[in-house]
């Protein structure tokens, strides 16, 4: 057994079967041996999977261009509940990135802004939300001299530590402010609960993980208030669908993703909140072709549905429920501006750059190749969705 497998096995031996969300938490995020705590690169050609960042710097260039356009929009107020007589003050500009992995995307964004928007770059505060001290060190190495432009916090809650107008080197300015908070493939890596449908009783039950002869196996957890999910979190089915939904139909729930989005909305005074993730709407999860759910793992670019094998040695992911995320933001007072594919989002930005190529930089053959990979429907263009919400 690997170190992570031993930790999980010991917990099961001590306490009995655990929810899959706990298994996923330990496999991916254990501070001692979790998958995302490994120093070797898990992204790109030599890793386990590709992301938009691994395609090349164009993804960061396009985001930097769009972020600059947003931050420089004249229609933005100073932030929060600023009064008209103080609108002439210079607003603080912030970009906050969560789930920055090795900070390659942060480096691409900052490098483009420093070259193409030097005035904005000088005013900008770039924050990375990163709970792992180990990953913070990797990110500083990736950023190099640009690390001097970046500040780190462990959680979104840490952003509330400084009162408005009292920024410090360890806490961001929260007075007159324009913010962009974003994440790239963060929510789809948060621990999920795996639910199954009992057609005879017409109720949901939760799949847990047990230990059987040194192997991790699925087991049905007892439906009990002390061990099960609250009824309010369970998918609601209309009578017609509950009558025909096949026995054993699987869906995943991710309360952690909705909670993170609510927290991000609560710290944002004035700006935009957006994410890039695999995912779909709530009704799309309940379709016949997804009877086994969306939970999957990746190792050496090969997908597998044996997510219990080799904990900490393979990535684990599940599609994001964008209906739940959108509702969480709107409940926090945000306005939904866009929900579209990555292809639609990036093509719209590219169209703006084509009108002002001098300010963006030349569209080289290499940039064109990267753009095709990022937007082609059979590659990354359709599988990734983008949700943008704002507060003004």
Image (spheres, rainbow, N blue to C red):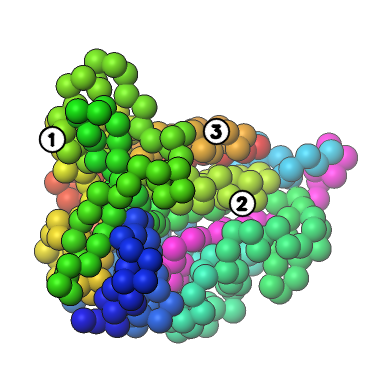
Q: Which residue is mark 2?
A: 179
* Front label number (2 vs 1): 1
Q: Position of residue 140 (x, y in %)?
A: 49, 81
Residue at 51 percent across and 38 percent down: it is: 328
| C-alpha gap between disc 2 and disc 1 | 40 Å
Residue at 73 percent across and 55 percent down: it is: 174
The reply to whether dot 2 and dot 1 touch (C-beta < 8 Å) is: no
Q: Earlier in the sequence, mark 2 or mark 3?
A: 2
Kindly state the secondary structure of the residue where label 2 is placed.
Answer: strand
Range of residues picked out in magenta = 84-108
Q: Quadrant of residue 203?
A: top left
Query: Along the line of sight, which residue is nearer the eye, 72 or 142?
Result: 142
- Taking 138 as reference, is 74 left or right? right
Kindly state the secondary structure of the residue where label 1 is placed.
Answer: helix
Query: Along the line of sight, which residue is nearer the eye, 8 or 140?
Result: 8
Q: Position of residue 220 (x, y in %)?
A: 25, 49
Q: Position of residue 364 (x, y in %)?
A: 26, 60
């Amino acid at each position: 057994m690997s170190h992570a497998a031993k930790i999980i096995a010991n917990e099961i031996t001590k306490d009995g079967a655990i929810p899959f969300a706990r298994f996923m938490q330990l496999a991916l995020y254990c501070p001692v041996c979790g998958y995302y705590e490994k120093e070797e690169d898990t992204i790109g050609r030599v890793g386990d999977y590709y992301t938009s960042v691994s395609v090349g710097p164009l993804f960061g260039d396009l985001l930097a261009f769009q972020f600059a356009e947003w931050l420089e929009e004249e229609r933005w107020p100073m932030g929060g509940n600023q009064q008209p007589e103080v609108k002439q003050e210079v607003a603080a500009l912030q970009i906050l990135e969560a789930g920055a992995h090795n900070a390659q995307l942060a480096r691409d964004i900052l490098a483009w802004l420093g070259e193409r928007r030097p005035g904005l770059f000088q005013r900008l505060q770039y924050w990375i939300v990163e709970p792992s001290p180990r990953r913070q060190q990797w990110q500083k190495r990736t950023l190099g001299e640009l690390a001097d432009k970046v500040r780190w916090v462990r959680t979104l809650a840490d952003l509330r530590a400084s009162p408005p107008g009292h920024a410090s080197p360890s806490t961001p300015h929260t007075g007159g402010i324009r913010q962009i908070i974003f994440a790239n493939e963060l929510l789809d890596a948060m621990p999920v609960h795996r639910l199954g449908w009992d057609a005879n009783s017409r109720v949901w039950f939760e799949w847990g993980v047990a230990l059987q002869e040194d192997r991790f196996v699925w087991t049905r957890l007892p439906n009990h208030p002390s061990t099960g999910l609250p009824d309010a979190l369970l998918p609601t089915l209309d009578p017609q669908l509950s009558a025909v939904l096949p026995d054993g139909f699987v869906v995943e729930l991710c309360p952690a993703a909705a909670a993170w989005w609510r927290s991000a909305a609560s710290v944002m005074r004035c700006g935009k909140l957006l994410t890039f993730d695999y995912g779909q709407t709530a009704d799309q999860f309940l379709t016949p072709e997804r009877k086994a759910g969306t939970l999957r793992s990746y190792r050496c670019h090969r997908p597998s549905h044996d997510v219990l094998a080799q904990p900490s040695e393979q990535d684990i992911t599940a599609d994001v429920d964008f209906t739940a995320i959108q509702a969480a933001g709107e409940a926090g007072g945000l306005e939904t501006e866009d929900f579209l594919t990555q292809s639609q989002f990036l093509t719209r930005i590219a169209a703006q750059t084509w009108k002002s190529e001098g300010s963006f930089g030349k569209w080289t053959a290499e940039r064109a190749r990267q753009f095709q990979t990022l937007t082609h429907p059979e590659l990354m263009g359709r599988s990734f969705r983008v949700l943008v919400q704002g507060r003004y």
